Image: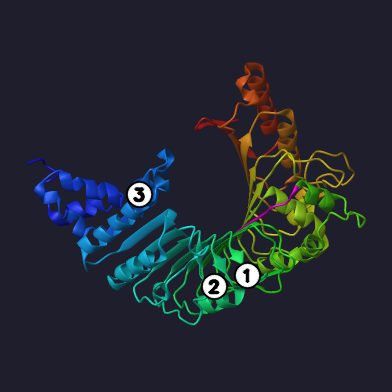
Amino acid sequence: MDRVSSLPDELLSHILSFLTTKEAALTSILAKKWRNLLASVPNLDIDDSVFLYPGEGKGESDEMKQSFMDFVDRILALQGDSPLKKLSLKCLNGVDSDRVDGWMRSVLARGVSDLDLTVILDMDEEDNYQLSPKCFECSTLVNLRLVCGIDVRWVAGRVCLPLLKTLTLDSVRVCSGEFEALLHALPALEELDLVDLSWQDTDVTVSSASLKTLTIKLSDVSSSLSFDTPRLVYFEYSGYVASDYPVVNMESLLDARINFFLSEDQIKQVREPDDDDDWFDEEDALGYSNVWKLFHGVQHVPHLDLFPDTLEVLSLCCESMPVFNNLKSLYIKSSKERGWQAMPVLLRNCPHLKTIIFEGLVHHETDKCGDACDCVSREDKGSSLATCPVKKLEIHGFRGTMKEMHMIKHFLDYFPCLEEMKIYVEEKDPTQLGNHEVSKLVLEMFELYNKLSTCNIHLLVNDYLHKN
């Protein structure tokens, strides 16, 4: 007997739980001992693309689809009423809704705590699978993930999930009123992921007294977006700007990441507003005028991440930008296509900032770039930096260009409290540092900078620390 087969059945079942269910089922041909191990596997990972091999066209066969559904029936029948911890079910090639309902009744009756569903129905059925109410009447569910092709608009009023801590809704249909009712019926909810949802209406409110982590990704513009989440500690927002943010209650927030998406036409309008531009959407303009409400709601956060398009939008509300009294760490991602017009006001409104992390220094130059950079010569050069108490700078993606070197010198000259600067060389793409002469010149310039500054400069190249 081989060493693996000599292991206890409980341990073998645990090992099988790390395989897809199809792979685990195939182990039954190894020896007699393996034939019934699948009956006690606590985790099932069932994926019709693995079973049907759609890349070879077999997934389009009705016979193969029927074979897949029969396979799932056999697996669940084999396991009987044995305890089940996790089910991941992905049906992307069309499946019968009655079969799915039966599978859900089976696994929920067995005390499943982790449920991950992706369901697309056959073409002759409704467009979306209406999730069985039983999925929202389970006393054991802790984690629930619903992806693609699932309709949850009609479940409000039927929810009883007292232990649910994590909920992910990805590309599913929802109605804002019923969505609010759903959240209020989840007393233990701590983590919520909302990804590309199809809203039946456009006024959306995320309200939860227990929620601690919220990730929201918007592929459509909402008329209004509110957040009543007093215990939230982590907030990640990516997508389009909503037209309004009536309520933003995040008084416990510790970490926020805000990444707006703008088209090139929208960028043009942000930089040079023109009332005669008919193509500019009125909702977009309204959203830009109200985006300050979102930032006032997160103004007490200690750590904030901002992305290129977000800085462009912030340039429109500099006069109403809040003071970030608690902000200690600021992350800025730059792009050569996006400007820094909001940077001077932002830095002046961070009176207790200690660390700035730059992902790239190169940005789009405009006459409104401000004094935070060295792009445009001006009389008040460096004034916003001079009032900023930052002590540590990290610069990632350094490529060894003279423009970057001038920016670094600008920071050294005008940040009065700067004690340490770490510069990380770009690793993914070729840089000018590959040229021996350029590399030598850069190192010489860093040596000069050190002589002129009290700041300790560290250059990190291929995990090697070069201290000048």
Residue visible at 68% across and 74% down in the picture: 247
**Is 187 placed above or below 464 here?**
below
Comparing 272 with 66, the one in front is 66
Dot 2 amino acid type:
Arg
- Which residue has dot 1 on it? 200
Q: Please state which amino acid type lies under the numbered disc 1.
A: Gln
The residue range painted magenta reads 257-263
- What is the CA distance from the residue labelled 2 to the residue labelled 1? 9 Å
Q: Are marks 2 and 1 in contact (CB under 8 Å)?
A: yes
Q: Secondary structure at mark 2?
A: loop
Residue 415: give x, y in percent of width and height.
73, 46
* Vertical arrangement, residue 48 with respect to residue 125, above or below: above
Magenta-drawn stretch contains 248 = no
Is 126 situated above or below 272?
Answer: below
Which circle, 3 or 1, is nearer the viewer?
Answer: 3
Q: Residues within 10 Å of mark 2 (few under 14, many from 20)?
A: some
SS for tag 3? helix
Which residue in the structure is indicated by mark 3?
64
Disc 2 target residue: 153
- Residue 271 drawn at (x, y percent): 84, 50
Q: Position of residue 344 (x, y in %)?
A: 78, 52
* Residue 359 image offset from top left, x and y in percent: 63, 43
Sooner in the amino-acid sequence: mark 2 or mark 1: 2
Q: CA distance from mark 3 to mark 1?
A: 35 Å
Residue 81 visible? The answer is yes
Q: Are marks 3 and 2 in contact (CB under 8 Å)?
A: no
Q: Residues within 10 Å of mark 1 (few under 14, many from 20)?
A: few
Image quadrant holding the C terminus, namely: top right
Q: Count the labels in the image.
A: 3
